[in-house]
Image (cartoon, rainbow, N blue to C red):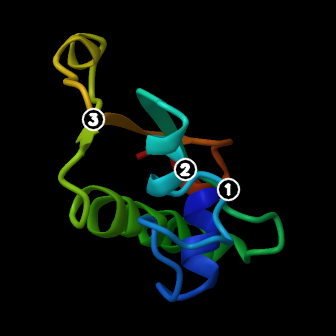
Amino acid sequence: MFLMKLWKSNGQLTFSCSDELAANKERLLQGGIMAQGFAIFVPPAVKVEQKLQVALDQIHYFYEDVLGKNPEMKHIKEWSDFDLLREGEIGAMLILEGVDAIGNDLR
């Protein structure tokens, strides 16, 4: 729920060191974590017509705050990307929790 917390804070939290985030960069590095999944989660209370935008906002935070401001974070897009990680780098995988965000139209 990391991305949801960034979204709810309107960008006031930061991935690098915000204590409110259980999986911030500082903690991942201290724990020797090599890869972390970042789930897009749209709360059930969000109106149907707003769900896609909430998901897109969370994707924005992933690219801007997680990857954009932290060069040691490497975007994992396929299995072979794990083999490219070097010491001190952390793989970042963007994942979707549930499919509410895509709404009723699969197009």
Residue 19 sits above or below residue 12 on the image: above
Q: Earlier in the sequence, mark 3 or mark 1?
A: 1
Q: x and y percent of residue 40 in the render?
A: 56, 53
Q: Distance between the Cα atoms at labels 2 and 1?
A: 8 Å
Q: Residues within 10 Å of mark 1 (few under 14, many from 20)?
A: few
Callout in the foreground (3, 1): 3
Residue 61 image-quadrant placement: bottom left
Residue 83 sits above or below residue 100 on the image: above
Q: At label 1, which amino acid type do we have?
A: Ala
Label 2: state its secondary structure.
helix
Label 1: state its secondary structure.
loop
Count of numbered labels shown in the rendering:
3
On the image, numbered disc 3 is attached to which residue? 88
**Residue 27 numbered mark, or none:** 2
**In the rendered image, which quarter contains the N terminus?**
bottom right
**29 relative position to 19: left or right:** left
**47 relative position to 21: left or right:** right
Residue shown at the point (52%, 65%) measured from the top left: 52
**Residue 22 numbered mark, or none:** 1
Q: At label 3, which amino acid type do we have?
A: Gly
Callout in the foreground (2, 1): 2
